[in-house]
Image (tube, rainbow, N blue to C red):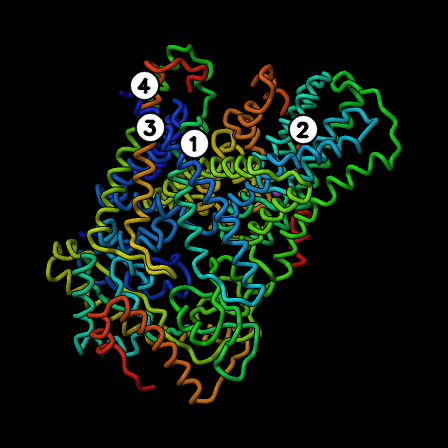
Amino acid sequence: MISSIDKGMGRVCDAFGVAASLVVAFLALSVGAEVAVRNLGLPAFGWTLEMCEYGLLVVTFLGAPWVLRRHEHISVDVFTRALRPRTLRVLLTISDVVAATTCVILAVYAAEAAHEAFLKGSLLFKYLVIPQWIILSVMPLGVTLLAIEFLLRIWRRFAGPQEVNPA
Amino acid sequence: MSGIGWEVMLGLMGGSLVFLMGIGVPVAFAFLALNLAGAYLILGGESGLRLLALSTTEAVTSFALVPIPLFILMGEVLLHTGLATRAIHAIERLITGVPGRLSLVAVVSGGVFASLSGSSIANTAVLGRVLLPDMLRLGYHPMLSVGPILGIGGVAMLIPPSALAVLFGSLAGISISRLLLAGIVPGLLLATLFFLFIVTISRMRPALAPAQSAEREPLGARLRPFLINVVPLMAIVVVVVGSILGGYATPTESAALGSIATVIAAAAYRSLSWTAIRKALAGTAATTAMIFIIISGSITFSQILSFSGATRQLVALVVDLDIDIGTLVLMMLLVALLLGMLMDQISIMLITLPFFMPLIGMSDVDPIWFGVLMLIALEVGLITPPFGLLLFIMKSVAPDDVTMRQILVSIVPYIGIELLGLAVIFIFPILALWLPGFL
Amino acid sequence: ETVLRVGTFLSPQGVWHGPLEHLIETVNGKDTDLKLELVADPSSISPFQLGDAVSGGVIDMAYLSGAFYTNLVPEADANKLFNVPVAELRENGAMNLIDQIHRDKMGALFLGKMGDGIKYHIYTNRSSDEPRFEGWDMRGTPLYRPFMEALGANVIQMQGSEVYSAMESGVVDGYAWPLWGIGDLGLLEVTDYRVEPGFYNAEISVLFNEDKWNSLTEEQQDTLRSSVIETEEWFIDYRNRVDEEQRRLQADAGIEAITFSEEQSQDYVRMADEAGWAVVIENSPELGPQIKELTYTDKQ
Ligand code: NA
Ligand code: NA
């Protein structure tokens, strides 16, 4: 059961990794194209700036669970490095619980903010007019996945296939 | 707010942050956890938490941050297309018959990459992967193998393009183009000091860097690969700097042009493949996500601190102390160096700049000079334990038998040199301000 | 003593902060148990969230320009277009209408309006005899983008922090900004001309959380209302003084005024207003026209 959730998470995270990579390509190409178009004397796109901003949001919060799965989030291991494996496992589990709880609470309030914007029909009036709830949904989605991944880390540490690197 | 003094609150917030990081909570999530507590207690209950959700989202939804992924992308493209490897080998052919040869190759290549990429991480990874195995095989001491790579890696954030300088400029509200220009001379100064150190130490103690049998190639043959594989890459620099100065692009837009130019360069060398592109994009996305979630956590953290009044009180306290501005700048640099041992560069900027910039603004100190000094201090933080970003990168790209202990021993002289460079720029501000003076 | 938490969307120094400072001093100087305390500025709450902050009760009072909370109240976009003086708006029912809209949509009162008559101007490095900027590259924000397009300009979006570099190197030919404060952005040295007829208002609203308002005594409410009105009245002299200072500052920096014939100037301002109202009415087809009716006269 949990191992199939784990597999599913792997797929979702990889898909978001691909999405984040595509956003990076979009940043370079859209801004580059905007410069080219303008210097050719053609009208500027207008939407580049805000689309890039939303793109960064996607990279940050949908990329984060993928990065977590790849063990690439920065943590300070100087104090924990010297600990015995048993103690280390306990400490890392506590830290995963703290992180998972943080993500759950953040997800709840962020989802509430998105829901409220949805009910009110709030719109973001920029060059493009976009419903605010779409933008506000990105973070709750990302941190929910982060919470699941932190819990899966605990599960993997105690029940899953043994990993070489306990972090 | 609620009765407790700001000093106590500042101490509690800071202390809990260090505690959470200490037990292994990833940096970004330590910030986010503290923010939840801060939002509830300081902003006020559930509406505080809802506002926190909005601020955390908005913190990274900012066009000012776009150059960061783009500058990282330049480094990743150089890495995954093999352009970086070719350039290093070309520089290696050029530098022969000197003691500590490969260490000098590392410094020169690092300097070249610093001008091609805005990412210390990518640069360190490139040099670590390409040069380190050879150095270790030939019996180079860590101080002359791991050390120079780590030292020169940091210079990438001083010599433009630099993702960190862009971020510094936008957070501090100072001219980004001036700050970028101001970093060039200090960056070259540091590289020169590294170079001199290596030449000296390998003459004094030849055992640290075993001499290789010098194959006597004629200069022409040695120069050829350099002219073919390194010099043309400078076209990328021309695109980045030229597009700004020529009025074709803003500094942000120039980052996009730079990354496109890097891809075109790879194509021109017939090194471009879908695999390389995919790896470069994925590497950039991962590093960006990792950095940006820290940014979002720490921007919000400093917002909450500011809302609590602690920021204002601390500034007022320092102003009341009435110390002269030179001492004050030294104190600020000391704070940055100390925080640099524990935190990443972006978090330090986010935490300190809201305190520092108002104080600088009230004095007659040139903010560009101050910016360069801060960037050097932050650069030191990249290689100081316990938390040094480049140390982790090095550990992950170096062969497995390189221990963290060896890495730590290797960097001591380079930290010393960077502090020396910091002192020189502090005493001679003209070194930083000369180039931006032409703008 | 009731301490009210105030937030501003601008950094709390310089000419823009003057009106809020006056308001805070006025309230605190009165012989009541009310105290306003400035707790939030852009270093703690982003301008784009100040509306949410006052709506949710994180702060009690906000000093905020309409452009920053259109997600909550789309009609706030119209604030910049009012050309009926605020004292008259209080007479003719406009303030009541706007106040009601704010209560309905964001749970906040619309207590007052500062900034009447601080005009936006176009600043450029190119001279022109007529109010047409065909093919000019202009930095634009959603606030005045439609007007720039109506003038024939090619609108380019960029962050405020890049305008300096863009003007310096010629990426753009110009930008729009209020008469106040281009010196604070360092733009004096990279700007050659100011187009003289100004347009719109760099308005600032004073918003107040509705629940908090209802918890105040009637006397406290009266103190706040009268202090806001006093500040609105005080503001007119203040504005004239700062307007003059800023013009002098720009002249000293060598910025020349570009002027047009009276007729051209009128057309120019009308074009700006029409472009602005069209957007307001498109985004708020019902309330938009009602607001326009009460706040705007098409007489120059
Ligand atoms: Na660089
Ligand atoms: Na460090």
Say if labels 3 and 4 share a chain. yes
- Which secondary structure lies at badge 4? helix
Rounded to the nearest whole Å, what is the CA distance between mark 3 and mark 1?
Answer: 16 Å
Residues under numbered marks 2 and 1 in contact, where contact means CB atoms less than 8 Å apart: no
Residue C184 is at least partly visible in this image: no
Q: Earlier in the sequence, mark 1 or mark 4?
A: 1
The residue that disc 3 covers is A8
Report which quarter residue B56 is drawn in. Answer: top left
Given this view, does label 3 or label 1 mark the residue nearer the observer?
A: 3
- How packed mark 3 is, by other alpha carbons closer than 10 Å (few <14, some 14-19, many 20 or more), is few
Q: Estimate the x, y position of residue B27 in percent, counting from the top left.
A: 42, 31
Secondary element at tag 1: helix
Tell me if B216 is positioned left or right of B123 in this view.
right
Residue pointed to by mark 2: B148
Instruction: Give the structural element (helix, strand or loop) at label 2.
Output: helix
Residue at 51% of width from left, 44% of height from top?
B68
The alpha-carbon separation of the residues under discs 1 and 4 comes to: 18 Å
- The amino acid beneath tag 4 is Trp
Which residue is under mark 4?
A: A155
Are the numbered discs 3 and 1 placed on the same chain, yes or no? yes
Callout 2: residue from which chain?
B
Q: Image check: B122 left or right of B143?
A: left
Label 3 vs label 4: CA separation? 15 Å
Tell me which amino acid carries mark 3: Gly
x, y percentage for residue B238? Answer: 68, 51
Percent x, y of residue A135: 33, 48
The chain to which mark 3 is attached is A
